[in-house]
Image: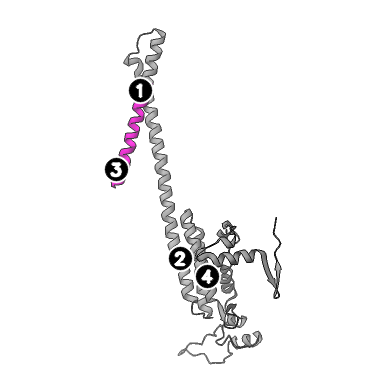
Amino acid sequence: MKNCLISLAIRILIGVVAVVFVLAIAAAALATEAFFSGASQPTYVEVAPLLTAVVASSGVLVALLAFSRDREKLAREREENRSKILLEQAKAGLDEVIELLQDQNNNRVIWVRAARVLLEATALGRGIKAPEYIKAYRLYEDKTRSELYRTLSTYNEETQERDPLPPQFFYGIKDWSRPISLDDAAREASPEVRVSSVSIDSVVPEPSLKPLAAKSVVAIFEFLEYPSDYTDPLQEVQVWQVDWDRSYGPSQGARRYVAHAEVTTAVGGKLHKREKSG
């Protein structure tokens, strides 16, 4: 409230100064014209209509400028507040997706829930318009992708790299890491056929669906891919041009590697020199 009153006082002061300035210019113009033409100095009655029009137009102009500026400021504040709310809700949704899948489960119900939350969260993210909040959301998306990548992959101790989940995983069977064919996994995941009598005293057991819903799998793994409009900030990075033998400090090893990798490549255990482009 205090800031609003201060802002209003400043606008009124600016308006008054502007009006006085315009009146002074108008009066000086009339007096100058009368002096050079030899006419008598204009009286108040003659000047009054002009001054009234000038004052009115000046006041309207000042009011319009103040209104336009305030409207733009309010619109910007509304957009920032809206973007802030959308960012918080989108982040909460992405956090929930990680929470649902972080134990590397292959439960159909949980995957459907995670896919729905993911789609809703990314839809909220697309509604963010304030530039600084757009950047914050994209950074959080990248963080979520990184965490999902670790969750939806397995660590290979032999290669010390991460491998994709095997296709048997998505059939929802328990021991999905054992070497069985997809046909056997499909048979194992198929619901049992049971014949039971229908009674008012008990409910009919529902057949369990183990295989993951295809759409939930597609939604989650498509999110792991970077969007087509993604702008890689690494494109702006310039590779070191300084000779490696003039480098010192903690970057010495990194600079030697970059210098070597820029001119050398290895294929099938054999070294080759890279051709310089351009």
Above or below for 196 versus 58? below
Mark 1 and mark 3: Cα distance apart in space? 29 Å
Magenta span has 5?
yes
Q: Main secondary structure of the magenta part?
A: helix
Q: Earlier in the sequence, mark 2 or mark 4?
A: 2
Q: Is residue 57 above or below residue 167?
A: above
Q: Point out the stretch of residues depicted in magenta.
A: 1-25
Q: Secondary structure at mark 4?
A: helix
Q: Are marks 1 and 2 in contact (CB under 8 Å)?
A: no
Residue matched to label 2: 91
Q: Amino acid at mark 2?
A: Lys
Label 3: element kind: helix
> Where does label 3 land, which residue?
5
- Which residue extends farthest front? 245
Nearer to me, 245 or 231: 245
Return the residue at label 1.
24
Please report contact status of discs 1 and 3: CB closer than 8 Å, yes or no: no
